[in-house]
Amino acid sequence: MENRESRNKFWKGVLVGAMVMAFVCLAVVGVSAGIFLIGRTVIDSQAQTNMQQAQAGEEAIQDSFFDKITSKMEYIQDIVEEYFLYEEDMEAVEDGIYMGLMYGLDDPYAAYYNEEDFKAFQEDTAGEYCGIGAMVQQNITTGVTTIVRVFKDAPAFEAGLLPGDILYKVEGEPITGKDLDLLVNEDIRGEEGTFVNVTVLRGDAAEEVELRIERRQVEVPTVEHQMLENQVGYIYVLQFDTVTSSQFIAAVEDLQSQGMEKLVIDLRDNPGGVLDTAVEMMAYVLPEDKLNGLLIYTEDKDGKGDRYYCEDGLIRAQNDYGYRETGYPKVDGHELDLPIAVLVNGNSASASELFTGALQDYGAAVVVGTQTFGKGIVQNLIPLGDGTAIKLTTSRYYIPSGVCIHEVGVTPDVVVELADELKTKSVVELDEDNQLAAALEALEKAEK
């Protein structure tokens, strides 16, 4: 009897903890989405009464919900204790409940991170990490993880990993559907000098290829640049890290010092990254005298959110209750007044799509390549105060024209596929790149 009472307390504690965490997190999400109630001091008594009645109704529903779940969990636990062959790991069971709660949201980006997972997620990887030197992307519908880029001379390159390979197993365990952040931080990265065994599916025949790849310190080149023929500058942006905007500006200034007259910004295979960085780069490139200086904006489920502007040489954000500080630097009214082409493909996602869409909306660049990935929603990572955290979708992104690119992507002005013979090459040289050639041709037609 005593064991049963203890067990019941355990289940009730777990369930209440799960639900309280969920409701607390939703409250936190409200704050992060810009729902600020400061300044609203007058609420009429009828509104207060209506609110109290609504809250009482919600609490009754929640109580009924708790009772139903608690009762069923206790029944399931009785069955487990009666028939389960192995010993229960109650900590794992508790984690599983929270994971199930997030799974039930039907949000492909939602996830629960236990203490160990959250610690791995927080690992600082800006610019340098101990890994294999490859970029991956996950299909949110199928859970399939694909290699999209292999860095030259990195361990993955030396081991024979190729773009287009489907990551099937790590250390013999199937990984399809595993949260991508956890997959990278827990399974791929690790101590320098150790090895990771991966199995990939390659080609149309899905041939299984096993590779043993060493983990090493890998320097991630977030921005690369060079001057091409005819005074055309070329800047490749790998992803939007915290250091990327300063590197991008430095690359532009270096190319301008060499007499740059036109510019290609290559965002192919760029998975996105830090929104602040994309906003800073937009403000540096775009003029302020069109579309009221609007760069991007977000909306949550209540239609509220942030609008990011560049006005009078200052980047700032406005929500439904007024302006707020963003921490962004001044750009002093800077703009790039020269023909620009942006290269994108189906792996260009999130912040790279927002950057591309903003330039396209402003008429500041011609977009070349193929339809982008179509990720225009915002995820927040919310610590729960006990070393764990959850991640869930909280709002949508919109480009200046009012279009939400989610599940749509950005349509290029000039559509051109990468040549088939180049799609599985680890390194595509610029002089053989047919998409780059199309971008250069588009620039030739562009008017200054």
Image (cartoon, rainbow, N blue to C red):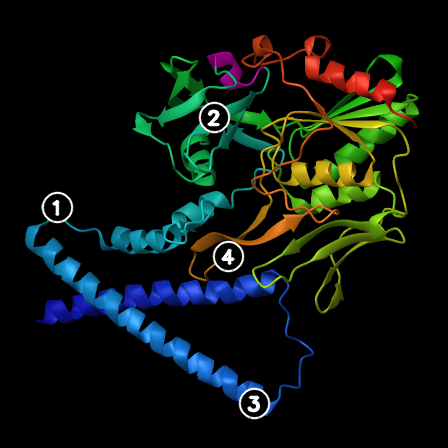
Residues at discs 1 and 4 in contact (Cβ within 8 Å): no
Left or right: residue 121 versus residue 425 is left
Residue 158 covered by magenta stretch: yes
Residues at discs 2 and 1 in contact (Cβ within 8 Å): no
**Residue placed farthest to the bottom in the image?**
45
Q: Main secondary structure of the magenta part?
A: helix
Which is more N-terminal, label 4 or label 1?
A: 1
Which is more N-terminal, label 2 or label 4?
A: 2
Q: Quadrant of the C terminus?
A: top right
- Say what amino acid the circle numbered 4 marks: Ile
Q: Is residue 84 above or below residue 239?
A: below
Which is more N-terminal, label 1 or label 2?
A: 1
- Say what amino acid the circle numbered 1 marks: Tyr
Query: Gap in Å between the C-alphas at discs 4 and 2?
Result: 27 Å
Task: Say which of marks 4 and 3 sits in front.
Answer: 3
- The tag on residue 46 is 3
Which is more N-terminal, label 3 or label 2?
A: 3
- For disc 2, the marked residue is 146
